[in-house]
Amino acid sequence: HIEQKPSPPRPPSSPPPSAKKPRKAGKSTPLEKTSDGLALMLPGGGHKRLTLRKFKGKVGIDIREFYEKDGATMPGKKGIWLTPEQFKAIGDAMGTLEEEIAKLGNE
């Protein structure tokens, strides 16, 4: 029989270790929960939003422009729907794309 010692009490302000999520330095994801999924407002103006959601029973990524009408934000016709596989292909290519963007920016 092995006797276990109780762990020392944590200060009330610190969350339990399991609640802490590791973060990459300098990176943040300002995702917000919406009525239809998880959304990210894209920088640069133009009211573009990326939303992970379900539509007609299928999960996908909707990248769409929004506009204001009578004080409400409404989805516009300009947009694209990506399957998770298509979105993963973009993610897989991000390193190369970022390198090429940097090269093009220095020309």
Image (cartoon, rainbow, N blue to C red):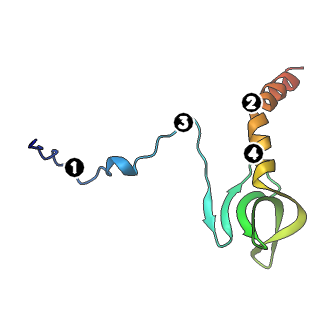
Q: Is residue 47 left or right of residue 30?
A: right
Cα distance in 3D space between marks 3 and 2: 16 Å
Please tell me which residue is depicted at 84% across the width and 61% down the height of the picture.
Answer: 65
Indicate which label's residue lies in the foreground, 1 or 4.
Answer: 4
Question: What residue is pinned by disc 4?
Answer: 88
Question: What residue is pinned by disc 1?
Answer: 11
Indicate which label's residue lies in the foreground, 4 or 2.
Answer: 4
Indicate which label's residue lies in the foreground, 2 or 1.
Answer: 2
Q: Is residue 25 left or right of residue 58?
A: left
Please tell me which residue is depicted at 87% across the width and 60% down the height of the picture.
Answer: 79
Q: Say what secondary structure mark 4 lies in.
A: helix
Q: Where on the picture, by quarter, is residue 101? A: top right
- Which of the marked residues, 4 or 2, is nearer the chain's N terminus? 4
> CB of mark 1 within 8 Å of CB of mark 4?
no
The tag on residue 24 is: 3
Cα distance in 3D space between marks 2 and 1: 41 Å
The tag on residue 95 is: 2
Q: Nearer the viewer, residue 23 or 81?
A: 81
- Which of the marked residues, 2 or 1, is nearer the chain's N terminus? 1
Cα distance in 3D space between marks 4 and 3: 20 Å
The tag on residue 98 is: none
